[in-house]
Image (spheres, rainbow, N blue to C red):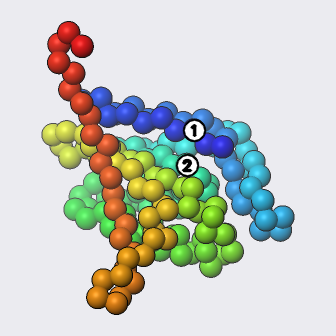
Amino acid sequence: MTMIISAHLGDFILISADKRAMIFDLETGAMRVSNNDESKIELWCRGAIAGTGDTVLINRIMNYFKSLNPTDLNLYQLSIIHKEVERRLIEGIPKEVLINTTIIFSIYNGCETSLYTIPIEQFFKKIDIEGIPIIRSRIYEVKYMKLKSGQ
């Protein structure tokens, strides 16, 4: 089981993770330990990225972030994640395995750093808009609280 701790501390972002990697074994239909030395936090041109859950999905998404050019204005991370989720389903990975995957990443925009989380579970939830099923995926910003002096 993966453990990631992340916190937005105003001027600083903290991301910490264990090193155990789990993969889904298509032959047995069970999760198993792949290795105990997996780097779950990677740097990309605008921050750091980490993930919990399906190691293959996380690594593919990390590779996308790491391949970005610092001059790229648009990230398209939701589209890329959606494509990779569909790819894992086609590869035979059950939805129940992918649902427990979460991506956490930071972005520095030149002035401040923000921390975001993307739970993969939302890619499986569809809402009906005028009779058309739509996937409503979102990126959630992890906010920080300023403590008043004396607290």
Q: Nearer the viewer, residue 48 or 146?
A: 146
Residue 29 lies, in percent from the top left, at 79, 65
- Give 94 or 56, whichever is nearer the viewer: 94
Residue 59, given in percent of the width and then of the height, sits at 55, 56
Work out whether 18 lies above or below 29: above
Circle 2 sits on which residue?
A: 52
Q: Is residue 45 visible?
A: no
Q: Residues within 10 Å of mark 1 (few under 14, many from 20)?
A: few
Image location (x, y in percent) of residue 137? 37, 67
* Left/right of residue 51 with respect to residue 151 in the rendered view: right
Q: CA distance from mark 1 to mark 2?
A: 7 Å
**Residue 104 in picture, x, y percent from top left:** 42, 48
Residue placed at 62% from the left, 79% from the top?
A: 90
Q: Residue, x 61% and y 42% (percent of image)?
A: 2
Q: Is residue 76 left or right of residue 90?
A: left
Quadrant of the rendered structure where residue 100 is? bottom right
Q: Which residue is mark 1?
A: 3
Q: Earlier in the sequence, mark 1 or mark 2?
A: 1
User: Along the horizontal axis of the image, is 142 left or right of 98?
Assistant: left
Q: What is the three-letter code of the residue carrying label 2?
A: Thr
Farthest residue, direction right: 28
Residue 87 shows in the view: yes
Q: Quadrant of residue 14?
A: top left
Q: Secondary structure at mark 2?
A: strand
Q: Quadrant of residue 12?
A: top left
Report if the CB atoms under discs 1 and 2 are less than 8 Å apart. yes
| Viewer-side residue, 88 vs 67 | 88
